[in-house]
Amino acid sequence: MNKYEDKYAEEVAEYDYDAVWILPEGARLLRWQIAGSAEAPEPNVLRIRVKRGTKVGGYESFEFEL
């Protein structure tokens, strides 16, 4: 199991935005802790949607297998 972790300043999103993490082919996301609405439409893709006014930052992580 592998884990990505990040810590950064907390803030409130000033606008709607999407972010996408694409892991190598064959990787599989296991779980995640991240602000906004997150989904894994493919085993190796994590899509995050954040709406304006959402508190973001602080700590985020996701675990995956290669």
Image: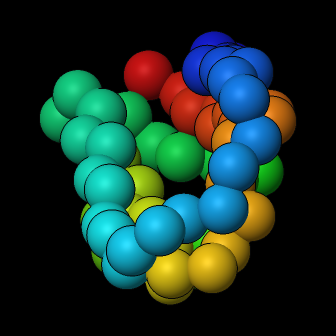
Query: In the image, is residue 41 above or below residue 1?
Result: below
Look at 23% across and 28% down and name the residue there: 24
Q: Is residue 32 visible?
A: no
Rendered view: 48 above or below 34: below
- In the rendered image, the quadrant that contains the N terminus is top right
From the viewer's perspective, tell me whether residue 24 is left or right of residue 9. Answer: left
Question: Residue 5, image x and y in percent?
Answer: 69, 20
| Residue 13 in which image quadrant | bottom right
**Nearest the camera: 22 or 18?**
18
| Drawn side of residue 25 relative to residue 58, left or right | left
Q: In the rendered view, does 44 fall on the left or right side of 53? A: left
Work out which residue is located at the far front of the displayed protein and give it: 14
- Residue at point 51%, 81% (across, down): 52
Residue 37 vs 46, above or below: the answer is: below
Q: Where does residue 4 sit, x and y in percent of width and height?
A: 61, 20
Q: Is residue 15 positioned above or below 45 on the image?
A: below
Residue 51 visible in the snapshot? yes
Color scheme of the displayed model = rainbow
Tell me which residue sits at (80%, 34%) in the image: 59
| 59 vs 20, nearest the viewer | 59
Quarter holding the C terminus is top left
**What is the count of numbered marks?**
0
Residue 30 in the image, given as x and y percentages of width and height: 66, 48
What residue lies at 63% left-to-right and 79% top-to-bottom?
A: 53
In front: 33, or 18? 18
